[in-house]
Structures are given as structure tokens and as C-alpha cells.
Amino acid sequence: MNGAEALLRTARAAGLDLCLANPGTTEMPLVAALDAVPGMRAVLGLFEGVCTGAADGYGRMTGRPALTLLHLGPGLANGLANLHNARRAGTPLVNLVGDHATWHRAADAPLASEIEALARPMSGFVRTTARAAALAEDAADAIAAALGPPGAVATLVVPADCQWDPAPGPAAPRRPPARAGAAPAALEAARAALASGEPALVLLGGAALSEPGLRSAAAVAARTGARLACDGFFARMERGRGLPAPERLSYFPEQAAAYLGGFRHLVLAGARAPVAFFGYPGGASDLVPPGCAVHALAAPGDDAAAALAALAEALEAPPALVPARKRPVPPGGAALDAAALGEALAALQPEGAIVVDESATSGLPYALAAPAAAPHTVLALTGGAIGQGLPCAVGAALACPDRRVVALQADGSGLYTAQALWTAAREELDVTVVVCANRAYRILRFEMGRAGLVEPGPQALALTDLGDPVIDWCALARGFGVPAVRAETADLLVDALARALATPGPSLIEAVLP
Amino acid sequence: MNGAEALLRTARAAGLDLCLANPGTTEMPLVAALDAVPGMRAVLGLFEGVCTGAADGYGRMTGRPALTLLHLGPGLANGLANLHNARRAGTPLVNLVGDHATWHRAADAPLASEIEALARPMSGFVRTTARAAALAEDAADAIAAALGPPGAVATLVVPADCQWDPAPGPAAPRRPPARAGAAPAALEAARAALASGEPALVLLGGAALSEPGLRSAAAVAARTGARLACDGFFARMERGRGLPAPERLSYFPEQAAAYLGGFRHLVLAGARAPVAFFGYPGGASDLVPPGCAVHALAAPGDDAAAALAALAEALEAPPALVPARKRPVPPGGAALDAAALGEALAALQPEGAIVVDESATSGLPYALAAPAAAPHTVLALTGGAIGQGLPCAVGAALACPDRRVVALQADGSGLYTAQALWTAAREELDVTVVVCANRAYRILRFEMGRAGLVEPGPQALALTDLGDPVIDWCALARGFGVPAVRAETADLLVDALARALATPGPSLIEAVLP
């Protein structure tokens, strides 16, 4: 057995079963080993950001790391933006990055670069294997680091000779420690704050956005009058009819600050204390209002659902009734805008769908309508590194082949990693892509105004415009082997969406928005 | 004047005139300043690798840095692969990377990451501006570092408040030092080696591949019997009828070693000593044969053309006649393969074309035919980070609007940064893209065999296959606003190529190869 096979057998023993690959010459022994080790599925991405974003989606849906297989420093570099999102999501993920043979490094061949230095900003674990005999143990350590808690991006740099040299065999999986619930003192502080009757907000993140977490949170809220909220950049949330729906903090710091202003207590359940997404002239970083006490019940990597269950018990809070919400009705007629799009999707999406939401400015109406949709899972953009949606949808579909995946995708963001469409076609994934084609970096038009640029010049306008020439998303999709249709009216959108959601395999709808 | 305007005025004073931008919120003051500072052209890329690759192409053609404008760590990360190529090419290039306002960093907002750490592996200069008043001087330092010598990637991280706060004004350009020619001792050593009559090779790189460099090298060769060669990963070379044509070192180390084996002297003129591109089991790193003396006449960043001129003078070598080469004839008939493609392009490309060659395995016949083509400039893949061709072609076209640019593009590599097509359409650039559509990562099929994988399994085969589903390059091109045609015969290719080369603006030909 060589090092490559020992590595993959170690991964299989730890329960890993997916490798999202864009390999090159320095990864050839690992490529060969993929056929030698049963149960490790290899999926090709045409670009490394597809692989890392798909691994993020897979990890969010399964709780298990996928492997990526990347080609030296430049290959890793191409995957870093989506690793940034995975890091912010706390997703377990293991990158295997091939490198030159150890004895070839001194030659500084054209593809050589400092791989560890590139990996470190986006990784919670970085190691370079020194010899084939150490590779299996290194892999077991990387997998353990990825599983956490908290979940992390782990990057293992694997020189080519460590792959091809003989190795003694696989390593045993490490036993992961349990995730922490609430510490007794933190539990009591949160309980006392919520029992005080003063205005309180429970900010939910991580496992608090699972169904058990949401139900415990709702019980706490019903018992104490506290409000429930989350920010828009969560890793995963269960949502829809019958599920408690937390309010959502605004992306704009003034609006978020205004919302938070009235609270005297902020209980953090799997969430960080709120900060501004961006800093603006004269603005603030910290959005916690003066005089508001912050109570950290559970950190983002903790078992916030268990912490909330304990909190509900400490408050003697019975299960809360979730208000009935009226099933949304699909819109009709000619006018297609973000509101009609949001209603259409909320009305038509099937139960158990996974919605990957990178819709940016077009997605607000959908986010408001979705709590009345059939129960579903939603994955959001955690780190602000755009180009996450289509890869993440591919990964979610690989994780959950029995569920429909909907990618609600802003057009500007989608163009960073549109190559993901090809992987969806090759793997025949049930992914329905809805492109919100407003043909601009619309968010930057808002941000221009906020920056005081009230009459932007021609170059500033051109830098936020995607309409010259118009990008034909249907042609792009067909180029990658995905059937596509354009919808310029609400009627056409509803028809196309109903058909796409009922048809196996991927398809794309270009929804032309004002 | 704010910091952003002071920065751009500093860049204009230093002669910079192009900013390849993919900005976000943290770069808004710089976006606004682009309209306030005359003569700084802003060009949008849909993906950061387009911006950095175009800046590389622009820098290779002009000798001046273009600016890039990138959005925090993830935006820089997306551009790193082509910065790796620019670093290996010694291209002058200045990245402006926006960051959170200095006072917002401690908040660790979602998009925050260690930008300097990401930049350092691919940059010869990295600095983060501390305050608006320092921004213009920092920019002047970055530009000077980029100009070198040697040329370098310079990365300046610009926090948002340093852009929007008031600044005293632009900084004066630094005076760049002259590039070194040959030191007297190095010149004498090279002269003596070549005059010895022992088998000698002059390995050319950098400025040695300019027309004056090539002519001096040819004079030296004619006088002494030395051979001339370059490796395939040069930044820029002048080529075609009437120009000396160095031999090309093979990518495969055994072939390169066999070629080099007979020489007793190796004179490096703007080139590094040859090393294997990859290390293989039982293989070598260093390709210099035992007993061969290496004479470093000029380093890659030196003025190797001046060094060769001095060497020719020291050897009393008269100008050499370049053998007449027969003008290639376009092929005809049904069979289209890499040989027919190479002949067609060599026959039809106009005088003064710029050929950006990322053709990988499909390009060898063209490389053999091109010395007989009309005189042209060729830009190659310097760092092995694929996805360089289309962006580099865009940058070359922005640099030289009066010249036809031909991108000879492998299909697998082209899919990393196909978004460059849209910039070519928007800017109406005279770029003719020829996609070598063999529908595989063909080089990896070779590498599999070299790795001993003689009967690859289904997963290994799938990871090197681009034919399931077939990628429709014509659809992709039209999606990005570029007219396109597919050629499945040599006749059709010749027709399409002749038409494309005679038509203003971009177009794409998908040449279907076996």
C-alpha cells in the first residue's frame, strides 16, 4: 500500500465518502487510489472554487467533512474564497493539497509556492506531511480537526512522494469530543436575564437554527416575552410552515442598530455578538446597544440546541405553538420582480427542499415569504465571499440525493463559479437554479449612495453594470450541459419553476428582474 | 482630496493608465475617484482572476504596471493563481486590495481575513496603508517595487477609511534604477566558455527573447557554434520569419535532460538554470548535466539583451543571417487535428499579432510551425497556474489596441477563467480565441501513464475527462457576448480563422480536436 491509499483508507474508516477533485500531476497517486479504495466517490469540478464550495455545502448538510483534492498553491488559491465561507460557517472540511515531491522543493520549479502560508488564513488546521509513513496519521488528525468541535477547515499538504512511497497502512479514526452545551453559570445568567422581564433578544446561530433549537428557542420566547432573531449570514436553518421563524437582522448597520436599540439583554445562542458587516464613515463596529448586557449561552461551535433545551427547562417553558401561516399563492401576470419571484418560489418549492440562497438584493421578498413555505432547509452566504451559491448547491445535492435543491442565485455572484453547473449536469443532480438577473451588481449601487456618490460617473456606473453586453445565462447553462429557460413574466416564471421542480436533474431559469 | 484620489493621481503621475477592477463596498471611494482622475481607464472583470491575468498581459506588453482593484481577502484570493504566473514572469503589477476601515478590523466582520498573509506568497512587495496621509507615498513605493528591476507583483492593502479620509495630495514618482547588464567577470567567463570550442548552450529568457536579444544571441551562436534554447514557460518572446528561433526545452524532464546531456557549458542569459517541471519517482530536480559548467551571464530581471550584445561584441561576432523560412500554407480537407490547427494559425496570423499560448498538449505543432509565421509576439504560461490565457489575452489587447491578439487556448485551462470573454466583448477587443477542444485534461492522461497508471479505473478516467457532458464553447462564448463558431474540419477552421482575424472585435472558434 502506498501513502495515497493509506490516506484514503483512513478517510473511509472515519466515515468520509466524497472527494471533490480538481487534480493535477502532483496528485496522480491519489487519483489512482480513488479507484482502489471502495466507497470513496470522486466528483470533478472544473474550477477549484466549485470543489471547496461543494465541500462546504456537503459538510453543512451531513456534518461530515468532504475531501477536496487540489493542485499545489495555485489550485488551493482558487478554492480559498469558498474556504473563507466554510470557515465562517464552521463547516467540517478537509483539503488535500498536492505538492512537489519533498526532494524537488529546493528546485523552486514553476508551480512551487508557499502552500501553508496560503492555507493558514482560511484553515483551522494546516500541516505538511513529511513522509509517506506519516500520511495516514496526519490525515486522521486533519479529519479530527475538521470535525471539531467546532467544525473547521483542515488543510493537509501532501507532497507527491508521500503519496507514492510505501506506507504501513491506514490510521484509526480519532474519537471526536462531544460538543459543549451551556455551562451552568452561563445557563443561570441567561435564565435570570430572561426571567427579569426586561426587553430581551435571543440571537440564534449554529445548532440553534436546527428544528430542535428553534422549538426550544420558541418555548423560551413564549415563556419570557423575549424576541428571537438571527443574522442573515447563517450556515444553515430549518424554515417553513410549522417552524418558529426568528426575525432577521438587517445587513445595513443603522437598521440593525435601530432594531437592537430597545433591548436590555442579548442572549447569544450559537451566535456571535452582532457587528456591522462593513464600517462606514462615522459608523460603528459593535451593534450591541449601550447598556445592553450580553449573555453568551452557547458559542457558535457549541451545541446551542442543547443549551436552549436546558434553558427552556430552567425556565419551565412548555413547548410553544407555532402560529399557522397561510400557504403562499403563486403570483400571476406579466410583472416579474423580486417580490413575484419570492412568492413564486415560496409557493412552489416542495417539502424538504434545500434552498441555497445567494440572492443578494433580490432575495429579501423571498426571505420574508419563506417562513410560510413548505418546511425546508436554507443555506446562506456566511463569509460574504461571493460565488458560493452554485457550488454549495452542488454539494448539498451530493449530500442529499433524495431532496430537491434550489439555488436562488444573484447574477453577479453566480458568474464567479458558474462552472458548478457542469458538475450538476455530469452528476445529474436535482438542482434547480433560479438566476435573479437584474444585470447589475445592485448591492454596489446602494453602497455607492451610502458612500456619498449620488451622481456616479460613467466609470463607476460601468463597474457596477452587467448589462453591456447582457449576459445570456441560458446560453451559459447550455454550454455547461444544463437545460435552461428565460422567464420575463411572472406567468412564465411560475410555469418554468413548476416544471423544473418536477423534473429530475438540473435546470436553470433566468428570471429577468427590473 | 481624499486618499483614494491621491492614490490614483500618484499612479497617473507614474504613467499608469489602466485599472482592472472587481470592486466591492470597501473600494467605493477608489471607484468614485476613477471618474475624478483623468486618464485612468477602468475595466471590469467578472472574476478577479480575469483582472490579475489581464494585468499580467498588460504588464508584459507595456513594461508598465496595471492596477488591479480587488475586494478584501477573498477577492485577492480569487486573483492569486494569475498573480503566481505574473510573479514567475517578472511582470510589473500593482494590486490595490480594499480592506475594512482600520477601526472596524477588531470586529472580525464576516469578510475579514489576513490579507497580507494571502498576498505574500505571490508578491514581491506587500504593505498595508496605516492612514490616508500615507496612502500616496505607499502607492509610489508599490509602483516602484513593481517596476523593479526586476519586475514584481506589488500588493497594497488599502483600508476603506484610508481611501475616504482627507489626504495632502499625490506623491512624486520614484526614479527606477536601470536594469543591470552583464558584470565584467560574468561576461568574460561566458566569453571564454563559448570561445573554448567545447559544446555550449545559451539558455535565453527575459529580455534575451526580445528582438535585439535574439539577434545578439544568434550572432554569438554563429560565431562560436553554441546552440540557443529557451524553456517553454517564458514571459514573452518575439518570433516569426526573419527572427532567430531558439530551440525549446521539453516539458518532460527525461527529454530535456537528454537534450542537455551533451553540453559542457551552459550560459544563462535571462534564464534560470533548468529544473524539472515536476519531480517523478526516481527522477531528478536539477537538469544541468554532471560536468557541465554553468555561467550566469544575466539573471531573469537583468537586461539580458544588453548582456548578449556585450557578449557578441566581446566575441567580435558579426550580425548573423537568419535562415529564410518558407511561409506556412494553410491545410485543407476534413481532418482537423493539432497539426492542422498549428499550420492554419501559423499560415494565417497577421504580422504583429500577439499570440497568447495556453494550448498545453495541443500546441506543440503550432510551436514548431510558428517560427515560419509572420513576425509576432508570443506570451506563454510562466507559472503553470492554468486559467492564464484568456485573461492575459484581454490584457494584451488593452495594452496594444492596434494589434490582433490570438488566444490559443486549451479547453480545460480555459474553463478556469472563461469570464474573460465578457470583458473582451464589453471592451470590443480584437481578440481571436481558438479553443483546442480535445475534451479532456489530455496532459493528465500522459501523466497518468508516467505515474504507472496504465489501466486507469473509471474514477481516474472521469477526473481527466471533459466530454461528459460535452462543453459547448460556442454557447459559453455567446453567453458572454462573443460570437462563436465550431470547426470540425480543417477547411472550416481555415475559413473561420481567416474571417475572425479580419473582423474587428472578439470572436471564438471551437476547434474540435481528436
Image (cartoon, coloured by chain):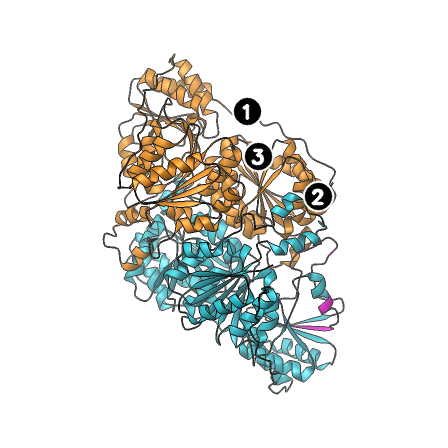
Chain colours: A orange, B cyan
Q: In the image, residue A14 lies at what x, y percent?
A: 62, 31
Q: Is residue B269 magenta?
A: yes
Residue A437 lies left or right of residue A432; in this view the side is: left
Asked if disc 1 and disc 3 are in contact, CB closer than 8 Å, the reply is no
* Residue A249 in view in this figure: no
Question: How far separated are the C-alphas under marks 2 and 1?
Answer: 31 Å
Determine whether B368 is above or below A317 in the image: below
Dividing the picture into quarters, in which one does residue B182 lie?
bottom right
Residue for badge 1: A178
Residue under disc 2 on the same chain as residue under disc 1: yes
Chain bearing tag 3 is A
Residue for badge 3: A145
Chain bearing tag 1 is A
Q: Nearer the viewer, residue A441 or B78?
A: A441
Q: Is residue A59 magenta?
A: no
Residue visible at 40% across and 49% down in the picture:
A473
Three-letter code, disc 3: Ala
Q: Earlier in the sequence, mark 3 or mark 2?
A: 2
Indicate the secondary structure of the residue bearing disc 2. helix
Q: Residues within 10 Å of mark 2 (few under 14, many from 20)?
A: many
Q: Main secondary structure of the magenta part?
A: loop
Question: How far separated are the C-alphas under marks 3 and 2?
Answer: 20 Å
Determine whether A16 is above or below B105 in the image: above
> Looking at the rendering, in which quadrant would you find the N terminus of chain A?
top right
Residue for badge 2: A132
Q: In the image, residue A18 lies at what x, y percent?
A: 58, 37
Three-letter code, disc 2: Ala
What is the span of residues highlighted in magenta in the rendered image? B258-283
Three-letter code, disc 1: Ala
Asked if disc 3 and disc 2 are in contact, CB closer than 8 Å, the reply is no
